[in-house]
Image (cartoon, helix red, strand yellow):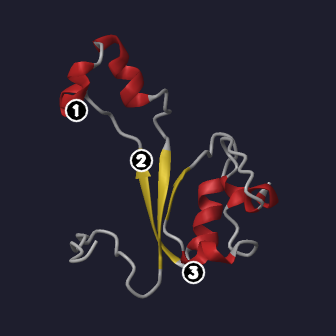
Amino acid sequence: MLQEVQNGKPRWSEGNEFDLLCPDLAPVLSQADLIVEMHDNYRPGVTEALVRRFVPSHQIEIVYHGAKYPVEFPVLKAVPAKEHAWLLQKGRARDQHWMRLLANRPGAIEPGKPYFLTPSLSL
């Protein structure tokens, strides 16, 4: 599967993060900032395995799915109320989570610290 991605033919499917995110096979991943939707329900233990795989090269944060309420999203006023639940939850399991991986490299963003874009003087 990784070969297909490297050849420009990505094949996305739920639960393949373990097979796709291999810094040994794709060294550029060691320097990349990543956000990965995890699928331990398809492959138990994948989150723990990827933490072990990336902890030498990245700062790692696990973000869990939480309840969302339509009142928090004013843009939903333009959407029929019957669609709010699907848009906000998308059928996600309560234990759905994501990994935020920030590469340990000079100038990298540090988790928990504010990050501001500096306006460019020339376009």
Residue ID for mark 2: 64
Q: Residue 73, labelled with which disc?
A: 1
Residue type beneath disc 1: Phe
Crowdedness near tag 3: few (<14), some (14–19) or many (≥20) residues, C-alpha within 10 Å: few
Crowdedness near tag 2: few (<14), some (14–19) or many (≥20) residues, C-alpha within 10 Å: few
Report helix, strand or loop for mark 2. strand
Q: Say if 93 sits above or below 24 in the image.
A: above
> How far is disc 1 from disc 3 in space, using C-alphas?
38 Å
Residue type beneath disc 2: Tyr
Ranked by sequence position, the earlier of labels 3 and 2 is 3
Residue ID for mark 3: 56
Residue type beneath disc 3: Pro
- Which residue is depicted at the point 35% across and 75% down? 109
Nearest the eye: 52 or 99: 99
Task: Please state the horizontal and vertical placement of residue 21, each as a whole percent of the image.
Answer: 66, 63
Task: Please state the horizontal and vertical placement of residue 47, each as a whole percent of the image.
Answer: 59, 56
- Which residue is depicted at the point 62% across and 70% down? 52
